[in-house]
Image (cartoon, coloured by chain):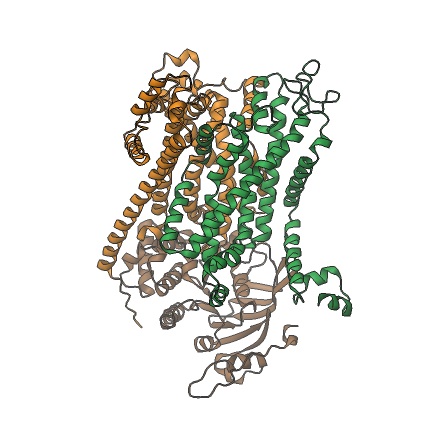
Chain colours: A brown, B orange, C green
Amino acid sequence: MSTMLTVDDLRVSFPTRSGLIEAVRGVSFTLGRERLGIVGESGSGKSQTGRAIMGLTPAHAKISAKTLNFDGIDLLTAPAKVRRSLRGSRIAMILQDPKYSLNPVMSIGRQIVETLRTHENVSKREARDRAISMLEAVQIRDAGRVFDLHPHEVSGGMGQRAMIAMMLIAGPELLVADEPTSALDVTVQLEVLGILDKLVADRGMGLIFISHDLRLVSSFCDRVIVMYAGKIVEELAASDLGNAKHPYTQGLLNCMPTLGTNRHPLPVLDRQPEWAL
Amino acid sequence: MSIPETVPTAGRSRARANGWAKSILRFLVIIVTTYLGLLAVTFFIGRVIPIDPVLAVLGDRAPAHVVERTRELMGFNKPLYEQFYIYVRDALTGNFGTSVLTTNPVMSDIRRVFPATLELATLGTIIGSLIGVPLGVLAAVKRGSIADQIVRVVGLVGYSVPIFWLALLSLLFFYAKLRWVAYPGRIDIVYEYSFTPITGLYLLDSLWQGQWDVFRDVFRHIILPAGLLGYFSLAYISRMTRSFMLNELGQEYIVAARAKGLSETRIIWGHALRNAAVPLVTVIALSYAGLLEGSVLTETVFAWPGLGLYITNSLQNADMNAVLGGTIVIGSVFIAINILSDLLYRTLDPRTRAR
Amino acid sequence: MSQSTLQTTPMTCRQWLMSDRPQSRLQARLGRAYMTWQRFSANKLAVAGLCIILLLILIAIFADVLAPHSPVIGNLGGARLLPPGSPGYLLGTDDQGRDILSRLLHGSRLTLLVIVLVAIIAAPIGLLVGAISGYAGGWVDAVLMRITDIFLAFPKLVLALAFVAAMGPGIQNAIIAIAITSWPPYARIARAETLSVRNSDYIAAVRLMGASPFRIVLRHVMPMCMSSLIVRVTLDMAGIILTAAGLGFLGLGAQPPLPEWGAMIASGRRFILDQWWVATMPGIAILIVSLGFNLLGDGLRDALDPRESGQ
């Protein structure tokens, strides 16, 4: 398996009035055409890791790495124009909540067409046809009608499918999915995951799946990275989850409810200050 | 895995029709109550506050039998509610009484002077929006930069400066010293008799008739007052644009737009501003209404023969019919602008369109 | 309590204020006030605004001492329309030989009088209407808010003009007219704040303890509306000053020989071409003071209400 993305010693920090806040502190991993899960609690730096790869780190943040390489392109030194042309066409991202991540005053179809026409020189007619077939690919029935709807007119599940369609229409090789199902109803979550799973497999994409849900990640990904306070505390194969060594990972696993057993008292995550060092 | 997504169309459209009926009804209630409220307040000002409205009209030297006859003619012997009923009836038919100053019916006076104010305020709003919106966008995009600071100061001064004072100084500077603009008034006396306006909006009329020299002269007269009013609306519009844009630029859909690989230009003008435009419509409408009102102070300085000058002249001569008529007309325009901006808001925001 | 803490663990005043475990209500309040002040004072422009307002108040208090000449009696014989910088008349004199500087200094009293009285009349009306409307809900809310909206839809300045025209020109009538037209926004704000606290648990707790609705509104709801109301009133001050000056300019506000700034501009208008300073000086005074209130209001909003600080 060839390596598509190399991240070595990635650091992201935000200068604030009360000092430098280090969101990501030396994260390293490599990714081929596989599914990598990044797990951690809020503020562990998992989202900022994803955004740094996308090049969507806020302008006032400081970002550094020994290597940040995508398919031979050094992302840190690449000019803004190159990075922009990568976004959407070769690296794409799915955000958490379609209620906020879709433009409310633009029809779903136009938003999908916009991605396509930004990266490919296609006619309006062709763009529309491809957008509709993309909507069908994310298993939306009556795609022609949904094409003209506005985001507020569709359910959360359908909105997230539209989001997937919008991000995958230009055929990216790497997809960063940042909590793609956390804002959805539990029943819809599995459907959307199923669609995502199928598309990633069919198109042979690399996937970085960011989530706080360890069980979800382990069932969906090949490998799992566990982050805590901006650092990777453990990296292991999804099938190996039972053998997790780090107490934080074990703690996360212990938090999961199991049927038929007495869970009193409920286990609480035990955080050691030295993990954050 | 196949997931049926069913969207009940028939039920939704029926609910939508129902919603439309409701919102139209709500609109009507708002229009009627607001207009009645406006009439009630002007009625109160004209008939209740003065100790004797008849004396206010005739002056205290009038002989007793004239006072008594006038009192009867004006209907002041009737109970207050009946007077109000007659007042509302008259106002709805456009009858605001006769102006003491001009001896014309107030309504025909207003019809004559209103286009001048309309032209001035409209041009002012156009100038204010065309400059204010880009400035606000610039300030939001370059937040914290020098440009942002300058826009902020320009806006703050606009908020803080007395409009009539700035008008005086600009006349002193641009007319008396530099001779860049024409003297106060609307049109040169040379053209006053040769030019016959159609709509009363001189810029449009002179263009329509192809009279370029008239257009040039009218433009030289209007540009200073309109530019001044434009500055005031610019102060408000740029400030609100900045605030709306900052709000939109912080939204998740902007991150998504970047993730799609769109250019910053497209993100700012196509996505963020398109969303900020929804509340901006209300802001621009409000500033338009504000300029119509602000004309009261500017028109006096520029001797601009509009509604503002008409009202201030009437004020100085205690011509209450004219003052109240003018107040009702400006109030009605305010109500109309509010309703129009509400309708425009609904068409711009798809979220309210469906409801 | 706080005293003993101070003695047992010696700490600086700043640490005591910034403590996240305040030992007394006083310490908590002072600490909060200190944090607000820190946020406020980080904004240079806001501090400048505050200085302008403080200066205005001091000038109003000491106008008698500061003014070199009488504000109403001029030297008609030898000092008419002197330009700025003339000996003894720093900002020049007007057509009646009165020292413009002295008139401006005394005029600060009128300006303060107008804004204080308008705030004292309009803010409580708005607060009461809004709090009752928000707390009562139902048809009370519907009726009160309809009335508020009707007033909001009116042209404020024109209405104030008509009011003064009917009641007769004068500074009291101008104040009443401005107050009558400026309460509706306060009612809106108070209602919005009330709605946000109405269903909170602490209000429910007070209600369970048997407090009357009157007491709840007065003691527990209204204080929550105060900070946003103060910000709004401060921001409105500039508008009030400008409206009052406009009324004065049209001859409907303070009557001569009172040194009201707007009226001073009006009287200087006749000489604008040759004696520009007569109309210019009072305008600068109005500009500075209303700029001060705008800067202060902006700073207060950012400091008291960090949510809105983007604006």
Tell me if I can see residue A105 in this picture. Answer: no
**Viewer-proximal residue among B56 and B165:** B56
Question: Where does residue C298 sit, x and y in percent of width and height?
Answer: 58, 45
Image quadrant assignment for residue A205: bottom left
Question: Where does residue A144 sit, x and y in percent of width and height?
Answer: 28, 57
Vertical placement of A67 versus C291: above or below? Answer: below
- Which image quadrant: the C terminus of chain A? bottom right
Question: Where does residue C195 sit, x and y in percent of width and height?
Answer: 45, 57
Q: Which residue lies furthest to the bottom in this view?
A: A261
Image quadrant assignment for residue C275: top right
Residue A265 lies left or right of residue B205; in this view the side is right
Residue B62 lies left or right of residue C36; in this view the side is left
Tell me if I can see residue C280 in this picture. Answer: yes
Q: Residue placed at 41% from the left, 42% from the top?
A: B281
Vertical placement of A16 versus C150: above or below? Answer: below
Q: Residue placed at 41% from the left, 19% from the top?
A: B59
**Viewer-proximal residue among C227 and C221:** C221
**Viewer-proximal residue among B354 and C202:** C202
Q: Residue furthest front?
A: B64
